[in-house]
Image (spheres, rainbow, N blue to C red):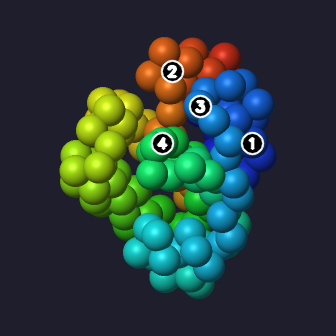
Amino acid sequence: GKAYTPADAQALIDADAFDGEMEQVDSYTVALLYGLEENAVIDCASYIAINSSASADEVTVLVLRDEAAKTAEEACKKRVEGQIESYQTYGPDQVPRLEEAVISRRENTVLLAVGNPDRLPQALKDLALG
C-alpha cells in the first residue's frame, strides 16, 4: 500500500475505530512517548484516549527520515509492550486490545493503532490502511 499520512489517524477516529474521546498529542510529546529523536520525525499525528486510565486506545502516524522508519517501528513495538505491562496492573481489561495492536510500516511511515478489536480491523480495511 501507499505511505501513511497524518490524516489517516483522524480518518480512523472518524471511522469509529476507538472507544471514547481521543485527544491530540503534539510532536514533542510523541517523540517522548515513543522514545524517538525529535529530528527523526518529519511529520506526525497522534491521538490518545483522554481517559487513559480506563482506555489504552491510541493512534499514531509517523512520517520519518528514511533511515529512521525501521527504528520507529521498533519503538512502536516497545511502546505497546510497555503499555501492556502498565495495564496488566491497573487496567487488565485493556490488555487484549493492546495485544491486537496494529503496527505497520510503509516506506518511511509507520502506523500504530490500538482500538476497538471489533471495529479497528474493518476500519483499516475500509480505508485501505491495513
Give the residue pinned by disc 4.
55
Q: Describe the element under mark 4 as helix, strand or loop.
A: loop
Q: Can you see residue 104?
A: no
Q: Specify the amino acid type for callout 4.
A: Ser
Give the residue pinned by disc 1.
10
Q: Specify the amino acid type for callout 1.
A: Gln
Give the residue pinned by disc 2.
121
- The percent position of residue 75, horizontal first and vertical second, equals 37, 63
Query: Mark 2 packing: few (<14 Cα in 10 Å), some, or many (20+)?
Result: some
- The percent position of residue 128, horizontal first and vertical second, equals 64, 24
Vertical relation: 73 (above or below) 4: below
Badge 3 or badge 2: first in the primary sequence: 3
Q: Nearer the viewer, mark 2 or mark 4?
A: 4
Disc 4 versus disc 1: distance between alpha carbons? Answer: 18 Å
Badge 4 or badge 3: first in the primary sequence: 3
Disc 2 versus disc 4: distance between alpha carbons? Answer: 18 Å
Badge 2 or badge 4: first in the primary sequence: 4
Q: Describe the element under mark 3 as helix, strand or loop.
A: loop
Disc 1 versus disc 2: distance between alpha carbons? Answer: 16 Å
Residue 100 falls in which quadrant of the image? top left
Q: Nearer the viewer, mark 3 or mark 2?
A: 3
Badge 1 or badge 2: first in the primary sequence: 1
Q: Specify the amino acid type for callout 3.
A: Asp
Give the residue pinned by disc 3.
19
